[in-house]
Image: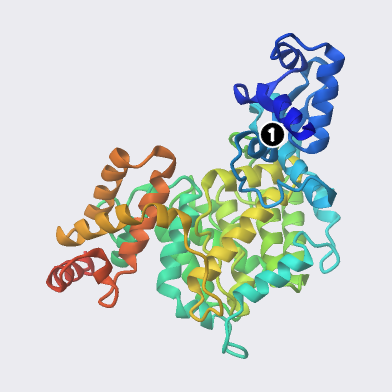
Amino acid sequence: MEAGTKMEWLKPFQTRPELSALDYEAAFDPRLPRRTAINRLNRLRELGWIQRTGETRATVYFLTQAGRARLTGEPTDAPLSLKEEGPEYRVTRKLEEVKHQLRRPVFERTPVGYRREFLDSYRPNDTFYLPEATRRKLLETGSQPGLAGEEAGTYARHVCQRLLIDLSWNSSRLEGNTYSLLETEQLLQSSQSGDALSREAVMILNHKAAIEFLLESASEATFDRRTILNLHALLTTDLLRSASYEGALRSDPVGIGGSAYLPLAIPALIESLFDQILMKARAIRDPFEQAFFAMVHLPYLQPFIDGNKRVSRLAANLPFFQRNLAPLSFTGVAEKDYTDAVLAVYELNEVSLLRDVFVQAYERSAERYTVIRGVMGEPDVFRVRYREAITGQVGEIIRAKLDRRQAAARLREWAEESVIEADRRKFIAAAEESLSGLHEGNFARYRVRPSEFEAWFERWNKRA
């Protein structure tokens, strides 16, 4: 009975995402006494079903993921959100608070500058952003049988062609690049395009060059100035106001769009902290902690005029290439999730959101590149939901003998008409991935004749 009563207490949040105490009082008929309303809100907070932000008259209450799950009866996708006791649940409540703060308009968020103590307090091999259990699990996931003692970069070179496409596309996509997976594949295979001089095409080609640089120098590249500066130069070639900015630490102030964070503007201090970040990164022994440390602190310092996040995403692969672990290509990472996670680092020095993105991205990437798996993975729920649609569209593309650019255009057009907006980009990516993985041993599932597949496959692989 008590649980049911508390469910009734949640109902005012069905129609409004945020409520003040006055709003909550007025949501019931008859209107609640103020003390009763506050007592109910405090009890719901204790259960973790709502959270509070602001002070005095600016105080508002909002549903947590656990609260939404209770109210709607639907499962929540947050792994800890249904825990109502213990430290794990407190972590989830903290993440809810972080997300809520980031949803506030920029002008309502307090401007913050670079906090040197965030870096100074990190002691390699003593401080850990990734828990031991997480690091151990990632090592098990990313380790490749039979590669012990092989030259650095051996495994990454085994999957080089797919990695070049995946990492170039995903990293560019996280910058807002609108090229599709198929368009990216065509561009990288031909190294030329009708849009070859567009900013988006240059960004993708720069990623290819930067990844190749890391692969070619896998046995020598590390978190040192030469590697990171050259990585930046390759990623930003022909994209900055002046070529002198490529591979150079910045001397000009920069701002972060959509953020209350104000990066450092003193060149000598930027250089000193840049060297400190690299020194600490080199000292970290665990490859996953090392990769994640780079993803946190390189963008936070903003040592370059532009391209800082791109540098951090590719630099994160250094320890994986060196130790023949599965590479990280950021497969399946949503742009908004990544942006929110980075903003939490900038404004709050909170790494939990980025840690979730990193761990999930690595697990997906490892599953994609691991050739020998001990355990079969669970079916992809999204692909199962759109299985018939993906099969039908891939089959139509084969029968129509469309090349990569034509296929990308068809998928976009079809998805706009037939797929709900929230699923469109993911549907297109899933269909494009299916097309990229087609060969003579798996085309039958798309209900096309061998002659149709052969005619399409010849055109599909014809270089522009």
Looking at the rendered structure, the number of numbered marks drawn on it comes to: 1
* In the displayed structure image, the side of residue 132 where residue 360 appears, left or right: left
* In the displayed structure image, the side of residue 369 where residue 144 appears, left or right: right
Q: Residue 400 or 168: which is nearer the viewer?
A: 400
Residue at image point 34% right, 58% down:
432
The answer to whether residue 267 is above or below residue 154 is: above
Quick check: can you spot residue 76?
yes
The answer to whether residue 137 is above or below residue 392 is: below
The residue tagged 1 is 100
Percent x, y of residue 243: 49, 53
Q: Secondary structure at mark 1?
A: helix
Which part of the image, by quadrant, shows the C terminus? bottom left
Which part of the image, by quadrant, shows the N terminus? top right
Amino acid type, residue under disc 1 in the picture: His
Q: Report which quarter residue 444 is drawn in.
A: bottom left
Percent x, y of residue 323: 63, 79
Q: Give the residue at the far front of this rendering.
A: 1
Q: How is the image coloured?
A: rainbow
Percent x, y of residue 264: 72, 43
The answer to whether residue 273 is above or below residue 92 is: below
Residue at image point 80% right, 25% down:
41
Residue at image point 25% right, 76% down:
440
Residue at image point 30% right, 52% down:
389
